[in-house]
Image (spheres, rainbow, N blue to C red):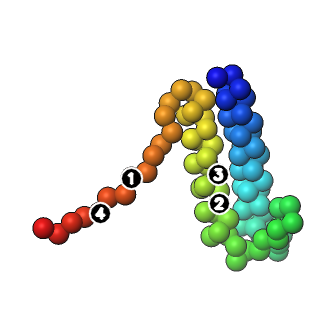
Amino acid sequence: MSRNRTELRARLEFWRSALVALREAYLALLDGQVKSYKIGNEELTRLDLATLQRRIEEAEKKVDELEALLNGDAARRAYAVMPMDW
């Protein structure tokens, strides 16, 4: 179990640092401080704000899920519901 917790902590730290980088890029582009922003080898512009926002939301969900797992809670699961017309 401790090995799993160690792996979960490592993943959580990774996603937290990724989230910080994504937020910094978003704010820099949004404030007009820069015309483009580089994360690794990826260059983002103001046109990428919507994509960047989606990536931030995904990273936030990952962080929330990993924190829940570390606290002993079950990971959230999504279920599809198909309305049927009888």
**Mark 4 is on which residue type?**
Met
Q: Quadrant of the N terminus?
A: top right
Q: Residue at x 43, y 51 (%)?
A: 78
Q: In the image, is 4 to the left or to the right of 38?
A: left
Question: Which residue in the structure is indicated by mark 1?
Answer: 79
Q: Which mark is residue 55?
A: 2
State the CA–CA distance, disc 3 to disc 2.
6 Å
Q: In the image, is 79 to the left or to the right of 63?
A: left
Q: Residue at x 82, y 74 (%)?
A: 35
Q: In the image, is 34 to the left or to the right of 6?
A: right
Which of these two is toward me, 77 or 64?
77
Q: Position of residue 14 (x, y in %)?
A: 75, 44
Contact flag, marks 3 and 2 (Cβ < 8 Å) = yes
State the CA–CA distance, disc 2 to disc 4.
27 Å
Q: Residues within 10 Å of mark 4 (few under 14, many from 20)?
A: few
State the CA–CA distance, disc 4 to disc 1.
10 Å
Question: Which residue in the structure is indicated by mark 4?
Answer: 82
Q: Which mark is residue 59?
A: 3
Q: Which mark is residue 3?
A: none
Question: Could you tell which of marks 2 and 4 lies nearer the N-terminus?
Answer: 2
Question: Could you tell which of marks 3 and 4 lies nearer the N-terminus?
Answer: 3
